[in-house]
Image (cartoon, rainbow, N blue to C red):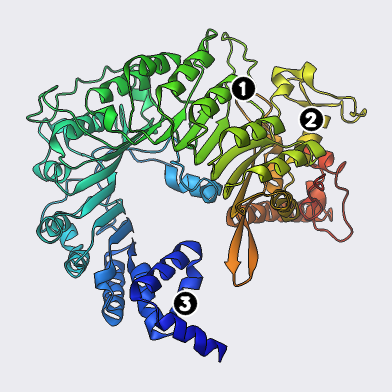
Amino acid sequence: MAMDSVKLDLHSLPPETLQQIAGHLNSAHRPSLYAFGLASKTCRNATLPSIFRDIHLAISSREGLQRSVDALVKTLSRTESACHVRCLNMKGSFRLSDRPRVEGYQSGSPWDRRSSFEASGVDEILVDEEPYSSSPHIVYDEPVIAKSSDEDLAWAPVVGLMKTLPYITKLVYRCRNQFPPSLLDALHDHHPQCKLYHLTFRLRTLLWGTPYPYEMALATSPCLYSVKVECSRRDSDGDDDFNQEAMMELVAGFAPNLKEVVVVNLIPENSRRYWPRPREPWRGLPGFVSGRSIGSLTSLSLLGASLRPPGPFQTFQTWAMHTDFNRLRHLTLGGGYGCENVGIDGEMMDWIAQNCSFPRLKTLRIRMERDDYEVERPNYANNAIALLRTFEPLDQLSVSGPLEPKILDAILYQHGQTLKTLNLHPSEQGFVAENLRFRRDIPMTFTKQHVLQIHAQCPALEELAISIKRTKSDSIEGEIYKSFGKMERLKSLFLTLDCSDWRVSRDPDSIDETSFDAADREIFNLGGLLKKGHVRETLMNCAVDETLARSIWDTICQSKAGQELESLKLWTTGGGHWGRSVFNLSTTLVVKNLSRSWLIERVARDNEDIINVRELGRRVREARDQVETDELKCRAEYYRKEKDIIIEPGDLAEEDTVVQVLRRVWPRKKGSKDWREDWSSLPLQV
């Protein structure tokens, strides 16, 4: 009877209201959306706009593309949902032959920067971060796709699909293949108002003097709304890459509706050998007249590494001449996983503060650097403060690089009252080289008082990402977690659990070693600075298991005021970094196993909440553990066959010095295979 009453109440609601309910379920918990659709035919129809608003195609072969499109068309027809599609997302690639695309540099590595990022497991943690590594990059990697060619015709299923989607407004293209002419024609002929997000954009024929006509047709399409382009000063073949210069001119005069640009600056594999050769001058796109017009981007992101000269300072100045910064709503300067020490320096900060204004900017992501390799930069903090004061109060702000308390004060004073999202990632340059200035800078550590300061000055804060120094789960660390509970509107929290200890090489006198015994005082390595006690404490900090992750969540939630916390991400990192540019490789294996990262989410269910806990990067960790297990087995087999010594694989692991240090914290358990089954996090003191 009660169920009949519920159905009656749902059926009495207007279709628009049911669709709003479905939309909420779609954003809050997708499985609940499908469950809602099972209640009745009326509810099912209400879910269709949410289910089919965004559709996806993953492409791996020509035949697979045809099968995927056929299946999608069949589903859309059966559910009568083609009218609900607003966005088509495409990613992947396919090849029509196994022949190399063009003659030229062939890398000996099977990895590109994206696959290397995925192999690290960090891609599950930093889902929005652009990976950076030295991998091959070739501008002219294949001939420009010709209209009605075999490759162009291979996209016929997608062209046909587009014709069946009457209200599509957005096409997101992430495929490694060149954008096909037939699909561009379909956009122009059937969906001229559809916005094209081309996230693998590249002009391949800029060195020809006059770019290939189809490339210019694509670049100047009225549908082109957003692009991401990877570029470099010189590619792996030694050819100059002028894609960034061309992009500036497209923005200024040729692409009428281009509003969003992401530039990823690379230092490609094999390109350094060509650095001594002077770069050819940029000739400009045909018909472009400098200064005649200026673009009106709403979003500009300059990521990755830049060479000097020209470096990021000159590049940003040039961008200022090609697009009106008064129109920008989103700006990113620096960023990318793998180039954390590359950012804007004091000279660039000062120029921006003196010459630029951003009255409409709402979102800023910025990475800073001291640029003090050879000489000190005493005005760095003042330059950073002046820069941050240049911007009107922001809604979202991410600052990474060298932070200091007075920089934090300036951030909160200028932007705190309006901030809904705040990301703070302190770091310092780890590079230490001969004949250069000795570096003593240590990344800023956030204390309980800093968290309370953020709480007091950011009343609207909903999302916060910040680093927390691990201190062996002691009461000081526990009090920091508890202080997050005071943030009434906080819904999402991302904590970087920092296990590094830069004091070892940069300020050893500040380390309290009164608890060290004789074994702790033994030298481990790092030129005699690193002691076994330092390694032991690092391992204790790196050990983050599910029990500790849940304890951190519970500690925050039990003291939480206002809005309930919806998600907590924990990224355990920094272990084995003691203030030098290289990690201690002998500790890497153990540190990676202990340093687990977690995602904890609250899922609303009827009258109670379900707390889901998931290890991030687990697949990669388990694969790495299996490799280590196999290697130990091979070594044990070698001892048995060649030396007639019977030894268990787990016993071989005990020979490692870092494992011997670990055993001082976690003795071997009866029946365990090796040290990986013996450790657990230190209980959180609250």
Is 466 drawn above or below residue 432 in the view shown? below
Label located before the other in sequence (1 or 2): 1
> Which of the numbered marks, if any, corresponds to residue 36?
3
Q: Earlier in the sequence, mark 2 or mark 3?
A: 3
Q: Which residue is mark 1?
A: 405
The CA span between labels 2 and 3 is 55 Å
Image point 48% across, 36% down: which residue? 418
Quadrant of the rendered image containing residue 113: top left
Circles 1 and 3: CB atoms closer than 8 Å = no
Picture layout, residue 310 above or below residue 246: above
**Of residues 13 and 133, which is closer to you in this image?**
13
In the picture as drawn, the residue positioned furthest to the right comes out as 518
Q: Please report contact status of discs 2 and 3: CB closer than 8 Å, yes or no.
A: no
Where residue 683 appears, as percent x and y from the top left, is 82, 48
Asked whether residue 285 is in view, the answer is yes
Point 34% across, 16% down: residue: 309
- The local secondary structure at tag 2 comes to helix
Q: Is residue 488 left or right of residue 138?
A: right
Query: Quick check: marks 1 and 2 in contact, CB under 8 Å?
Result: no
From the viewer's perspective, tell me whether residue 88 is left or right of residue 284. right
Residue 239 seen: no
User: Which amino acid type corresponds to the residue marked 2 in the rendered image?
Assistant: His
Where is residue 154? Give x, y as percent: 20, 63
Q: Residues within 10 Å of mark 2 (few under 14, many from 20)?
A: many
User: Which circle, 2 or 3, is nearer the viewer?
Assistant: 3
- Could you say which disc has been placed on residue 534 in the image? 2
Task: Give residue 182's position: percent from left, percent from top.
Answer: 14, 58
Is the C terminus in the top left, top right, bottom left or bottom right quadrant?
top right
Mark 3 falls on what kind of element?
A: helix
Marks 1/3: CA distance? 50 Å
